[in-house]
Amino acid sequence: MKFKNKILLIGALSALSVATVMAWQAYPRQAISFDCRGRLHTDIVNGACRSKSAADIFISFNPQGEGFILAAGSWSCENSQPVKVDALAKFTYKREGDFYTMRMQRSDPGIEALFSPLKYKDIKMKIIALNSGDYRLSLPNETLMVCTKD
Amino acid sequence: MKYTINNTVDYNASDGTLFSPENTIDTISLNRMCNELLLLFVTHSGTPLSRDFILNEIWEKRGLSASSNNLNNYVSMLRKALAQCGCSDLITTIPKHGFLFDAVITGTPLPDLLADKLSAPVKDDAESITVTAPPALIPRRSKKTSFRRMSGMLIAVAAGGLIAYGVLDAYRLHKLRSEIFRTQECRFYATDDLTRRMNKTSLVSRISSIAGREKIDCTLKTNVYYAADQIRDVSGQFNTRELLSYCAYNSSAPCENYTYIRSESGHEIQK
């Protein structure tokens, strides 16, 4: 095989590899296996009170289209006693475009005080890798947090 | 040297031909390997030969590689050639051992000739083969060369794939996060377009303020992500939401996220 042909063949195969990688990256995955953990500290001034919270948030998606959010921590209004919360919210999910639409099935009371999106019945969440271990979780109108893959 | 096999077939070991006037009008030409195999059989007529012995004598002593399958192929070809000459049952397979060539040989077997044949330098098969050799039996060097070529191709493809993946990932990350500044071991990134469009001085000031308030530790390698959004409501107040995420680099420790949500009048984040 001539040198030019070799170069051509290698070029073609490399292009094929690029196309494969791109296709693989662009391929929408309907169900994922994803566990992620992060700590969320909030300081809200424009609410009913100046509230603060600190919580460990654990989010898990399983390939069967189900998942759960675990929130453990506390919150308080200014000049009031902190309230401890250790709660779980279960959901089902499916992929819609770039977002995972999560439908809450059962939520323990008080969990929304630690993780505010849980006040909604349906959540559209985008999960984007910022590097090999950190993932940005965002709603269509806000970035919720960055978590570390478990 | 010429031999006569069972008084019916003339075998010329010098040029690898078989001639049987009673069965065929044409001379049958053997390929080089078949010729040497037949020469080995003829010189050991009546003696069971093990596969290892045959492989060693014909191939390995000359730096060639062959397997039992190759040997079977050549024995099969040789049987066909002998059958054409009316000698169909001269080679018997001895299960789990090798072969027995049993025939009446006339003519003087010359060990020197055999030795010469067996120690002859390796030539390209193309020069001496008149019957096509099975593709499985190619000299080792050719196999190596094609293996190297194939390996080279595969490595090039794999490297191409990896480079493509690296480039695409770097491009994707660049779109997702833009480094704003560094302090000690901390790298601060803006993670959305709204934040990226903010005035850099103001951005650095806001991030430094939050980092100072939360006592961000920059002695270890850390990625810090910042996102801010501000909406002005109908009463003229600015609703500001900021998120600073502190993620230890290359660690499974969970990221610390600091969210500030406030409503202020007249304190627009400088764009």
Image (cartoon, coloured by chain):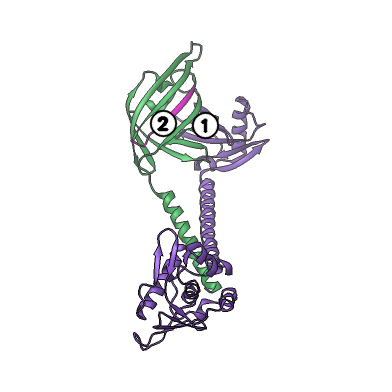
Q: Callout 2: helix, strand or loop?
A: strand
- Label 2 is placed on what type of residue? Ser
- Label 1 is placed on what type of residue? Leu
Q: Which color was chain B given?
A: purple
Residue B234 appears in the figure:
no
Q: Chain of mark 1?
A: B
Q: Residues within 10 Å of mark 2 (few under 14, many from 20)?
A: some
Q: Is residue B188 above or below residue A20?
A: above
Pinpoint residue B206: horizontal percent, then vertical percent. 59, 32
Q: Which residue is mark 1?
A: B243
Decide which of B265, A96 is in the foreground and name it.
A96
Q: Which color was chain A given?
A: green
The residue located at (57%, 74%) in the rendering is B118
Q: Which mark is residue A66?
A: none
Do discs 1 and 2 belong to a common subunit?
no
Q: Callout 1: helix, strand or loop?
A: strand
Decide which of A28, B195 is in the foreground and name it.
A28
Residue range (magenta): A55-64
Horizontal side of residue B87 vs B239, given as left or right: left
Q: Which residue is mark 2?
A: A60
Question: Which secondary structure class fits the magenta region best?
Answer: strand
A147 falls in the magenta region:
no
Decide which of B204, A119 is in the foreground and name it.
A119
